[in-house]
Amino acid sequence: MELFEDKGFRVKGTNLLIDPSTTKHSGAILTHAHSDHVNFNEKSKITASQETLDLINVSYKPVKKSNPLKFSKKTNFDNAKISLHNAGHILGSSQVLIEGEKTLAFTSDFKTQDSLILKKAEQLNSDILAIESTFGLPSFNFPHREKIYEDMVSWTKQQLALKRFIVLSGYSLGKAQELTKFCNDFLGISPVVHEKIFENNKVYEKHGVKLGTYYKLNHNLNDSNILIMPPSLAKPTLFYALEQSLGKKVSSALATGWFYRRGHDTVFPLSDHSDFNSSLDYIKNAEPKLVLTMHGFADEFARYIERRLKIPARALNGSSKKQKALIEFA
Ligand SMILES: [Zn+2]
Ligand SMILES: [Zn+2]
């Protein structure tokens, strides 16, 4: 069984196509609803979790032909069986297990820690493991999530004591839902959220993920002291406008696995991707005979895997280039 990259991930000798980078195809498996993984046309038959399909339907054009697949349910595809398994990255995000003459597990974007709203990725076993290497360098190891929440609580409480207004920023699909839940559970505050975030929150709730209460941003802030915004809109011009209209100072925090602040007062290393050490642990437990790396630091991570785990590894062709808008999604 051979996995290769050609406008998406394909298995040689089959019609399997995962996360195509082109809209020109008749069918594909979509691992999750982040825009760098979602490409289709109205004739494409989309195999995905129901959660992923629902998230796609609120954010992109609706999927006309779909094949919703429950986690762990096997379905026949060409000469193989495929199944989807929780990837712990965002709602509905899936790893793909392909069982033919060999087994191949494809993690796509995944996270190996529980978050406030999602269970961690299921550990799969396979002969060949294709794993994301977004954080494939040893410098990308994050503190325990509980520790990050503690730091977030003390920072926000400090700002509130200083009578500041707080802008929390995180990607509108995934991170922003955890921030909504965080405000409710850890601070007892119902945040105001950007419209895009509001729509995604509703899909999470439809699938049983409780986020607490929150308000849609529409010209008033409902007396809340916290606003949650996508990173692309949480900019100094917004902070300035808020300061003018509220008559108080704004403090801003960005939630991301990347290190830099981009004009924010602080950064919380809250990532929806597996860090370096947890990815190595996942590989060890998967007991593969070959590892293929994709996204981010693919070449570097492959060398670390060979050196530290003594398992043959290489970057998938074309995968060493950074995935699109990586910073937004991480
Ligand atoms: Zn993603
Ligand atoms: Zn991605």
Image (cartoon, rainbow, N blue to C red):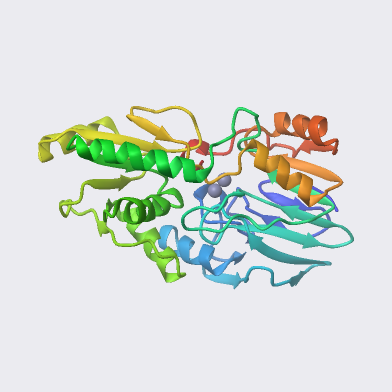
Please tell me in which quadrant of the rendered image residue 292 appears: top right
> Among all residues in the image, which is located at the extreme right?
101
User: Which of 96 and 17 lies nearest the eye of the viewer?
Assistant: 96
Residue 27 visible here: no
Q: Position of residue 4 (x, y in %)?
A: 77, 46
* Residue closest to the eye, 278 or 35: 278
Judge whether residue 94 can be spotted in this image. yes
Could you tell me residue 142's position as x and y percent?
Answer: 55, 36
Ligand 2 quadrant in view: top right
Q: Of 247 and 233, which appears nearest the observer?
A: 247
- Left or right: residue 211 versus residue 307 is left
Residue at position x 26%, y 30% in the image: 236
Looking at the image, which is closer to me, 94 or 268?
268
Q: Quadrant of residue 319?
A: top right
Question: Going 62% across and 59% down the picture, which residue do you hit?
Answer: 94
**Residue visible at 69% across and 34% down?**
298
Total labels drawn: 0
Please state the horizontal and vertical placement of residue 124, each as a whole percent of the image: 74, 57
